[in-house]
Image (cartoon, rainbow, N blue to C red):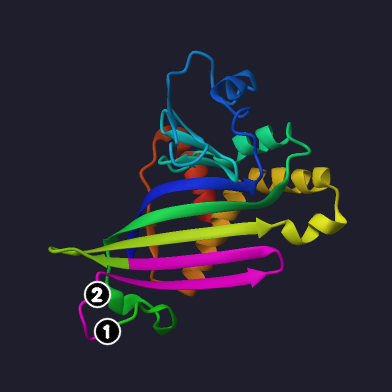
Amino acid sequence: MKFQFKNASCVVIGTFNVFVIQPKLLTEMGLIRKGTSIKVEQDLSQPGTRIQVDEVTWVVRPDRLIVESKRYGEDCGTPLAELLSKLLWTPVFAVGVNLAFTGVDIEESEIPDGFRLPKVEFETTQRTVHACIADKERVFNVQLAASKTQDSTNYELALNIHTDFSEKKSSHLQASLNQAATLACRQFFDDIAEITKFSKNLCPSLQFSYDIDNEHISVHRQMKCAA
């Protein structure tokens, strides 16, 4: 089964002031280069800002911060780590890394029985199988979905690995938890390698395809070897 890379993201779950975390602050911190053309969108359904910088997107909401990129090899974790290092007393509960892929050449017969998409007698618009394994505060998620259209079946693969700090909140100062969350953000590439390896162990027939340029090819090779 071959899947094409769609996007990757790093997510920090917590409580954030959306009126403080704005393009001006990110620019002053060096997280957005001065003079860079950006696109800012406001969420009218809830407080929040979406900041588009080239192929990188910042999403600032009261309950989470997200840095997402459609370019494989982009470090989505370090910018969040730099920001968290300045927000020592901001409540942070979890840090996660997400990868999304679209199916290119899918043979469902290659999917192991334990991770096989459910078959039903009646017509369905979507079939989904999800595996979740927890190892202490670390949680691994692999989800495969097949959506049927009039002409074909589209496949989506979602990988997630996250660390939950909420259980430690009662016994640790928030500043210590934020330091742990900052470190987790800096492990962005390690987490990608780990969740990729986990998904391949779960389904050995998985193959991943990436569109990369020369600037990011060394990162791609490091991540591929680690996986």
- The crowding category of the residue bearing disc 1, from other C-alpha atoms within 10 Å (few below 14, some 14 to 19, many at least 20), is few
How much space separates mark 1 and mark 2, taking CA atoms?
Answer: 8 Å
Q: Quadrant of residue 30?
A: top right
Residue 62 colored in magenta in the image:
no
Picture coordinates of residue 107, whole percent (x, y): 27, 72
Q: Residue at x 30, y 63 (%)?
A: 155
- Front-most of residues 56 and 198: 56
Q: Is residue 207 above or below residue 98?
A: below
Picture coordinates of residue 157, whole percent (x, y): 39, 61
> From which residue to which does the magenta span run?
121-145
Disc on res. 55 = none
Disc on res. 124 = 2
Residue holding disc 1: 120
Residue farthest to the top?
A: 35
Magenta stretch prevailing secondary structure: strand
Looking at numbered disc 2 in the image, what kind of residue is underneath it? Answer: Thr
Picture coordinates of residue 75, whole percent (x, y): 55, 39
Looking at numbered disc 1 in the image, what kind of residue is underneath it? Answer: Val
* Whether label 1 touches label 2, CB < 8 Å: yes
Q: Is residue 226 visible?
A: no
Q: Residue at x 54, y 71 (%)?
A: 132
Q: Is residue 44 above or below residue 54?
A: below
Looking at the rendered structure, the secondary structure element under dot 1 is loop
Q: Residue at x 57, y 47 (%)?
A: 11
Along the horizontal axis of the image, is 179 left or right of 188? right
